[in-house]
Image (tube, rainbow, N blue to C red):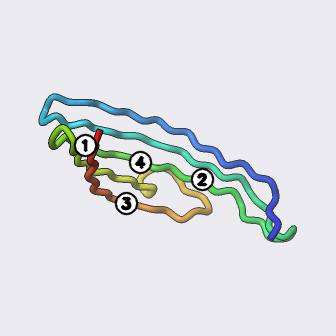
Amino acid sequence: VNVSSFYDSSVALLLNYSSRWWNLQFNGGLTFNHLSERTIQSNVTSGMSQNFTVLGGLQRSISESWVAGLNLSDQTLVGPAKNTVLNRSINLNFNYSYF
């Protein structure tokens, strides 16, 4: 399969705030993703695709070694998406630092 040259670009605005309230860290952001038109096998064109992603989350240190976090990612909240599949996810994570 031959694919023509194309551009893939993204821009992100991310913010982080560390609070004294329960030692929570708040994260937020907005990203814009753009993928230019591609031609496959010299006669099929994919079209340009673009979307926005809204990010949010919070983290808290449980102990010196453990951190818990909850994060949200949603591509359905902002802007007109073009020629793309939209995703929405919620993640719960626990991180252990052994150093």
Residue 33 locus on image (x, y percent): 57, 48
Q: Which mark is residue 50?
A: 2
Q: Earlier in the sequence, mark 4 or mark 3?
A: 4
Q: Nearer the viewer, mark 4 or mark 3?
A: 3
Residue topped by disc 3: 89
Front position among marks 4 and 1: 1
Q: For mark 4, does the 10 Å Cα neighbourhood hold few (<14), some (14 to 19), or many (20 or more) residues?
A: many
Residue hosting label 4: 54
**How many angstroms separate mark 3 from mark 2 (CA)?**
18 Å
Q: Amino acid at mark 4?
A: Val
Q: Position of residue 89 (x, y in %)?
A: 37, 60
Q: Mark 1 Cα within 10 Å, few/some/many (few <14, many 20+)?
A: some
Are the residues at dot 1 and dot 2 in contact (C-beta closer than 8 Å)? no
Image quadrant assignment for residue 10: top right
Quarter of the image where the C terminus is located: top left
Furthest-right residue in this view: 42
On the image, numbered disc 1 is attached to which residue? 59
Which residue type does callout 3 highlight?
Ser
Instruction: Give the distance between the C-alpha atoms of the residues marked 4 and 3, in whole angstroms.
Output: 11 Å
